[in-house]
Amino acid sequence: SQQGEEDPQALSIQEGENATMNCSYKTSINNLQWYRQNSGRGLVHLILIRSNEREKHSGRLRVTLDTSKKSSSLLITASRAADTASYFCATDPMLEETSGSRLTFGEGTQLTVNP
Amino acid sequence: GAVVSQHPSRVICKSGTSVKIECRSLDFQATTMFWYRQFPKQSLMLMATSNEGSKATYEQGVEKDKFLINHASLTLSTLTVTSAHPEDSSFYICSAWDITNYGYTFGSGTRLTVV
């Protein structure tokens, strides 16, 4: 399967700063999701944005989606050291709503927030 | 929220032996589970889609005789790595679609090391 692309691959910032990660994809989607993964652990779902939505907020997270450009961004405001993790976008074609579909993950951004 | 329990979290096995990984949906029924593999510092790659009561669907390049998937009930899917070799060492993660919460839930992953 083709993977989406994320940039930057790695991002290092100071606590309190904002972090922006971008994701591009190639296929049609029903929704796009962002996940966080701490080193050696499973994935934690952060936020889902549907293809007919342009922006979504959840706490310190802000996600945008531009289906014409096939791109999305994740903004984490007022970052904390605990935000240090890898962040992945995943596109979902949602071919079957009752069972879900195969997600296609981006390459991920490794975020380091320095105290 | 929905929980997928994955066991074991870590396993070390000798080359040539088989290893079974279990994923259970604890508070919802999962007609479909997805199995992913992740190599260090890389993204998740879908290996196969596990369907309750029927054969799994494997992604191109994934050997179905090597990675045996069984989805015997609506809450349990297992992945057996047969005749494991060092190149099978990886992080294996399962996920399930929870239609009630309209989201995917991931297991915590299994770190497999073949020596």
Image: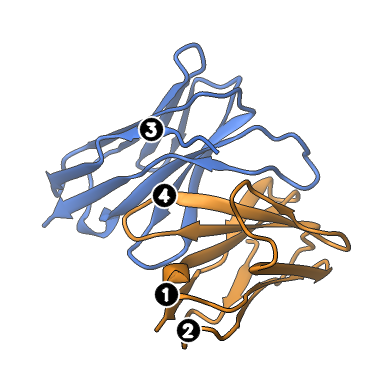
Chain colours: A blue, B orange
The image position of residue B79, as x and y in percent, is 65, 71
**Residue mark closest to the camera, 1 vs 3:** 1
**Chain name for mark 1:** B
Residue B22 vs A12, above or below: the answer is: below
**Chain name for mark 2:** B
- Give the residue pinned by disc 4: B43
> In the image, what residue type sits under mark 4?
Ser
**Residue mark closest to the camera, 3 vs 2:** 2
Question: Mark 2 and 1 residues: CB-CB less than 8 Å, in contact?
Answer: yes
- Give the residue pinned by disc 2: B15
Mark 4 or mark 2: whose residue is earlier in sequence: 2
The image position of residue B113, as x and y in percent, is 42, 78
**Residue mark closest to the camera, 4 vs 1:** 1
The alpha-carbon separation of the residues under discs 1 and 3 comes to 29 Å
> In the image, what residue type sits under mark 2?
Ser
Residue A65 vs B80, above or below: the answer is: above
- Give the residue pinned by disc 3: A5
> In the image, what residue type sits under mark 1?
Pro
Please report the residue visible at 51 percent of the width from the left and 69 percent of the height from the top: B108
